[in-house]
Structure formats: C-alpha cells, structure tokens
Amino acid sequence: MADRFYSVILGEGLAHQVTEGSSTSGEAIELRVSDSIYSNKLAVIIGVEAIEQYLATTETNPIA
C-alpha cells in the first residue's frame, strides 16, 4: 500500500474540501500518512491531534 496524502487549499476548512490522493498535490496545507500506519485510523487521528496541539500551543505566529 502506498502513502496517502490529504490536502486543502488555503482558506478551506470543511471535510468535503479535503483532497485525498496517493501522491503530493502541492497544495498549501498537506498531510502525508505513511503506509506503515495508514491501516490504524485511531493512531493517525491521535498523531494529527498531537500536531494540532503543538501548532496551537508552541508554534509562533506566523509559523517559522
């Protein structure tokens, strides 16, 4: 199984606006999920939530 890529265009924020593919789309915001973890949906969600918490609490504005 190949890695999965999820992306949105700047300003999009709804689930139906997410693009899913097997290769990079080059959009402004993109998440790559390795095929080694892709089959474990809960593990991916936990990881994405950790990244979200990091960005909300640690990262500077604008993102450095």
Image: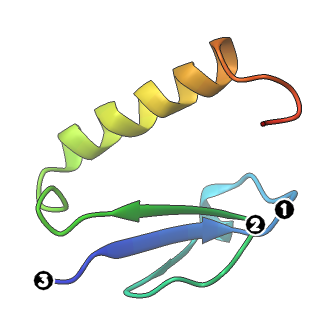
Which quadrant is home to the N terminus? bottom left
- Nearer to the camera, 17 or 55: 55
For marks 3 and 2 on the same chain, the one whose residue lies earlier in the sequence? 3
Residue type at numbered disc 1: Leu
- The tag earlier along the polypeptide, 2 or 1, is 1
Residue at image coords 60%, 68%: 7
Q: What element carries label 1?
A: loop
Give the residue drawn at x 66%, y 81%: 26
What is the number of the mark on residue 28? 2
Residue 23 pos. (x, y %): 43, 87
Q: Is residue 39 above or below residue 44?
A: below
**Residue position for label 3:** 1
Mark 2 vs 1: CB contact within 8 A:
yes
Q: How far apart are marks 1 and 3 (CA)?
A: 28 Å
Q: How far apart are marks 2 and 1 (CA)?
A: 6 Å
- Residue 10's disc number: 1
Residue 54 location, quadrant: top right
